[in-house]
Image (cartoon, rainbow, N blue to C red):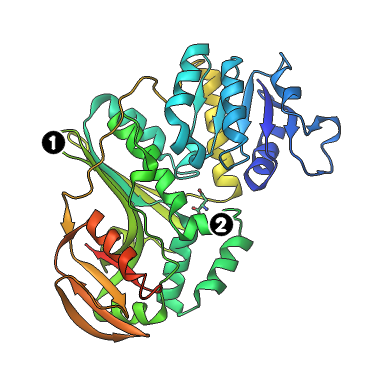
């Protein structure tokens, strides 16, 4: 296998190092705009040098971002080259088009590293859906935010300090706002529900609330409630085929499985009608765990030519986030316009537990309260 590698960042250099030790595959060209020592004539700034090289059969896309990654992936597939990508943002926006491009040319597209890094989660979800009816998927899908939450709650460290540590360790996205505002988690739950439920969701319809407004005053309230805050993504399918999905901070019981997930680890779970609940735990980010998943996919491309992870021609998933209701922790200085139990003062506002409210209405309420108090924070109770 001769590979064109797009992007020599943290994960790209991990893939380069692993492949360099193998005899069954070779990185023939590397596309990157930076000057990277040691690559000699392999380095190029022109995608066409990879696209038009007939000896390159497979493209590994690790540039991240929407464009030009999306354009390059579609052109590579249309040219009959296999694609392995970890780019969850691009997949969550262009899932159907990429699946179709692969089907049309007979090339394979494999995406294991896009959700859960080195954890063999997507692989097993793909296997499960062949036999089972998947009822829900979800969990802790972002390591950077779990590190922030865990460290803030156990050591009292400040938000910015822990974020810098995640960046130093190479877990955080290039722009960490996609971690802390939940875009990374939203992309991952979109791919997960597409795979689990056999459809294509509009990622922009997933209510998404991040953790950037979390304060030490909130952490004190969580302790009084005997709860632990985790950042969870979840998608479930209702009996009529509609889907509910959201990304939000959640206060879980201290003995919940997610509470035991520490540092930057992930736990991703699904429930099948036959198999029951399965949990997949481990390193969902970082150079070598993610590069490992990419190389696993490369091996599978060799072993099962043309077998893609994405199925073409699947229907749109209908999203409805007004069905399930839950109580929420809410901290704001704005007047609260729904039924809620007061917990006491917290920081510059007051903390409340709301009456049960559906996901869509709660996210909309917080958006309204932020016109008065932009620091308003909320987390679901589970
Ligand atoms: N920034 C992501 C995380 C990387 O922290 O989990 C893996 O997608």
What's the residue at 55%, 33% (across, down)? 85
Residue position for label 1: 239
Q: Find residue 213 and report its horizontal and vertical position in percent.
A: 42, 71
The correct choice, above or below, for 3 with respect to 252 in the image is: above
What's the residue at 42%, 53% (across, down)? 266
Question: At numbered mark 1, what does the secondary structure look like: helix, strand or loop?
Answer: loop
Residue placed most toward the observer, 96 or 301 = 96
What's the residue at 29%, 80% (across, down)? 221
Q: CA distance from mark 2 to mark 1?
A: 37 Å
The correct choice, above or below, for 3 with respect to 340 in the image is: above
Q: Total of numbered circles in the picture?
A: 2
Q: Is residue 16 left or right of residue 103?
A: right
Question: At numbered mark 2, what does the secondary structure look like: helix, strand or loop?
Answer: loop
The quadrant of the rendering that contains the C terminus is: bottom left
Residue position for label 2: 172
The correct choice, above or below, for 113 with respect to 168 in the image is: above
Q: Is residue 173 visible?
A: yes
The quadrant of the rendering that contains the N terminus is: top right
Q: Specify whether tag 2 is near ligand 1 (CB below 8 Å).
A: yes
What's the residue at 23%, 77% (across, down)? 352
Q: Quadrant of residue 75?
A: top right
Q: Is residue 21 visible?
A: no
Q: Are marks 2 and 1 in contact (CB under 8 Å)?
A: no
């Amino acid at each position: 296998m001769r590979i064109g590698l797009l992007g020599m960042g943290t994960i790209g250099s991990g893939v380069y190092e692993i492949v360099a030790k193998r005899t069954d595959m070779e990185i023939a060209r590397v596309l990157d705009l930076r000057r990277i020592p040691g690559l000699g004539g392999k380095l190029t700034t022109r995608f066409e040098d990879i696209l038009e090289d007939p000896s390159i059969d497979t493209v590994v896309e690790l540039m991240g971002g929407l464009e030009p990654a999306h354009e390059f992936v579609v052109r590579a597939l249309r040219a009959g080259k296999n694609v392995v990508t970890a780019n969850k943002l691009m997949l969550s926006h262009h899932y159907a088009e990429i699946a179709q491009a692969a089907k049309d040319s007979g090339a394979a597209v494999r995406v294991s590293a896009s959700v859960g890094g080195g954890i063999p989660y997507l692989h097993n979800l793909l296997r499960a859906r062949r036999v089972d009816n998947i009822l829900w998927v979800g969990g802790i899908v972002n390591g950077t935010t779990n590190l922030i939450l865990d460290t803030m709650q156990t050591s009292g460290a400040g938000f910015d300090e822990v974020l810098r540590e995640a960046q130093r360790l190479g877990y955080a996205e290039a722009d960490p706002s996609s971690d802390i505002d939940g875009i990374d988690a939203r992309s991952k739950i979109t791919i997960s529900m597409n795979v689990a439920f056999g459809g294509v969701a509009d990622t922009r319809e997933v209510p998404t609330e991040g953790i950037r407004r979390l304060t030490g005053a909130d952490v004190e309230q969580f302790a009084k409630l005997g709860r632990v805050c985790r950042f969870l993504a979840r998608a479930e399918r209702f009996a009529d085929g509609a889907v509910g999905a959201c990304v939000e901070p959640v206060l879980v019981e201290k003995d919940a499985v997610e509470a035991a997930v520490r540092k930057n680890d992930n736990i991703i779970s699904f429930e099948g009608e036959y198999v029951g609940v399965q949990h997949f735990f481990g390193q969902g980010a970082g150079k070598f765990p993610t590069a490992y998943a990419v190389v696993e996919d490369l091996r599978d491309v060799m072993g099962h030519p043309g077998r893609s992870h994405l199925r073409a021609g699947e229907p749109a998933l209908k999203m409805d986030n007004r069905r399930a209701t839950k109580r929420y922790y809410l901290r704001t200085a704005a007047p609260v316009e729904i039924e809620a139990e007061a917990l006491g003062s917290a920081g510059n506002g007051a903390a409340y537990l709301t009456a049960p409210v559906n996901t869509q209405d709660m996210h909309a309420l917080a958006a309204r309260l932020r016109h008065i108090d932009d620091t308003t924070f909320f987390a679901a109770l589970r």
